[in-house]
Amino acid sequence: MARIVKRERSSPYPVTVGTETKYICGCGLSGNQPFCDGTHKIAKDEPAAKVCWYDADNIRYAMEDTFPAMPLPLE
Ligand code: FES
């Protein structure tokens, strides 16, 4: 089963507990979830108004963003 999750963030969330800071992936591309592994760098120059996705080799694909808002769930 496949699943599409739309994320617009292209940087990690810093989380500090005590004196230790960890970086939580905000882009969804990390190979070390939930932690950032730096892969977000490939998303920095994504074209505006496009939806991008990446294959297992981090090759980018893009198409027009025709789904700017998530639809409501089916009833
Ligand atoms: S924020 Fe996702 S890999 Fe860094």
Image: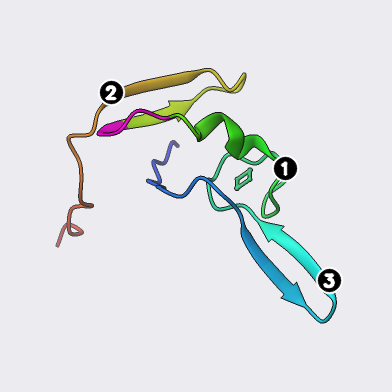
Secondary structure type for disc 2: strand
Which numbered circle lies on residue 37? 1
Image quarter hosting the N terminus: top left
The kind of residue tagged 2 is Met
Give 69 or 21, whichever is nearer the viewer.
21
Label 3 and label 1: CA atoms lie apart by 17 Å
Characterize the local packing of mark 3: few (<14), some (14-19) or many (20 or more) Cα atoms within 10 angstroms: few
Q: Is residue 34 above or below residue 18?
A: above
Q: Position of residue 27 (x, y in %)?
A: 53, 46
The main secondary structure of the magenta stretch is: loop
Characterize the local packing of mark 2: few (<14), some (14-19) or many (20 or more) Cα atoms within 10 angstroms: few
What residue is at 17 percent from the left and 57 percent from the top?
Answer: 74
Asked if the residue at label 1 sits under 8 Å from ligand 1, the reply is yes
What residue is at 20 percent from the left and 59 percent from the top?
Answer: 73
Disc 2: which residue: 63
Characterize the local packing of mark 1: few (<14), some (14-19) or many (20 or more) Cα atoms within 10 angstroms: some
| Side of 29 relative to 8 (left or right) | right
The kind of residue tagged 1 is Asp
Taking the view exactly as shown, the residue that stands out farthest to the bottom is 18
Give 66 or 12, whichever is nearer the viewer.
12
The kind of residue tagged 3 is Glu
Disc 3: which residue: 20
Q: Which residues are magenta?
A: 46-50
What residue is at 84 percent from the left and 71 percent from the top?
Answer: 20
Q: Pick whichever of labels 3 and 1 is earlier in the sequence.
A: 3
